[in-house]
Image (cartoon, rainbow, N blue to C red):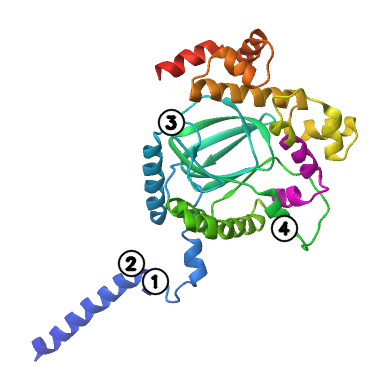
Amino acid sequence: MSCVVSMPLKWASLAASACCILRRTCPILRNRAAPPVESRRLCRIFLKTTRGAVPMEHRALIAALNDHADRLGGGDMPMPVGVPGLMLMRCEQVTELVPVVYEPVLCVVLRGAKEVWSREVPYAFRAGESSLISFDLPTRARVLEAPYLSLALKIDVGLLAELSAGGETTAEGPVEPVSQGVADAALMDGLTRLFRLKDTPAAITQLAPLILRELHFWLLNSSHGPALAALARHDSHVARIARATAEIRRSYTAPLRVAPLAKLAGMSASTFHDHFKTLTGTTPLQFQKQLRLVEARRLIEAQGQGVSQAAFAVGYESPTQFSREFSRMFGAPPSRVMREAVRA
């Protein structure tokens, strides 16, 4: 009789132990109330990391971007994706700080890390993070961790103004030319869908404007919102200087005249100069010079132009002056950059 009774007690004890183990290890039993759908989505958002790890669902996007870069021949220069406003950047090795002049652009880092210096302030962006440049801005940049991979989206100021129309206006406060954020689920979903249109021209025509509008909406409601809202306000200091920097970029090969730029910004010459220096960290003349030299380097490296040819193409009248200023900016004469480009 004792044996008959002891067997059920033994199995009951084992079952109780098994239940305890399940409660400790099974996430469903450990958290009896399942998290809401939004919470589960938020768990998939890119998180800040120093290792450059990305969620599993974005690895297919990374593979597709790498495949696209391979078909274009690789290289360290920004590459077109085939969808208006969208660019791909890939770099296989860490780089030195080099001058770069950005347009208004959003950059989402998918692998590695990049550092941007604006007004002698460094900003580092790692996998899962986004950076926003509010207006045409002279900077220095380098790849901190490689391999590096990112998607860049050109900001449409007209679309921002349209989306902001009728919204609440707030007093203008200080706006940094470079802002940092997290590449959240809504942003990544929109960028992925935009990239997938690249092989379907009809879809680009019909759907790209809708997705771009959606992306600008999410950006206005993200951590980048204050900078973009200031850019969208026609009378803000940021928007005024942005109009001037865009005009300098448009006509960078022509002689620079400050008076028309100040008039375009709706400011006196002295006020324009002060605000320009505050926001960009440089003067209009220095800004134009950086534009010219950065473009000249691109012509030499990417298109194989000679030193004098590149100098004249960007507005210099003296190749000697061009070589001197090029060497001062890049730390090497243009002739050496040309030889290295040919060897590469």
Q: Quadrant of residue 292?
A: top right
Residue 262 in sight from this viewpoint? yes
**Dot in front, 2 or 3:** 3
To which residue does mark 2 refer? Answer: 25
Residue 48 sits above or below residue 2 on the image: above
Give the mark nearest the N terminus, 2 or 3: 2
Q: Residues within 10 Å of mark 1 (few under 14, many from 20)?
A: few
Give the mark nearest the N terminus, 1 or 3: 1
- Extreme residue toward the bottom, this view: 1
Q: Which span of residues is magenta-colored? A: 226-246
Labels 1 and 2 touching (C-beta < 8 A): yes
Q: Quadrant of the N terminus?
A: bottom left
Residue 45 in sight from this viewpoint? no
Q: Residues within 10 Å of mark 2 (few under 14, many from 20)?
A: few
| Separation of residues labelled 2 and 3 (CA atoms) | 47 Å
To which residue does mark 3 refer? Answer: 75
Tell me, for residue 30, which label it has, or none.
1
Confirm whether the magenta stretch covers residue 244: yes
Give the mark nearest the N terminus, 3 or 4: 3
Residue at left offset 33%, top offset 67%: 25
Percent of width and height locating residue 97: 56, 25
| Amino acid type assigned to the residue bearing label 4 in the image | Glu
To which residue does mark 4 refer? Answer: 162
Give the mark nearest the N terminus, 4 or 1: 1
| Amino acid type assigned to the residue bearing label 2 in the image | Thr
Residue at left offset 30%, top offset 72%: 22
Secondary structure found at label 3 = loop
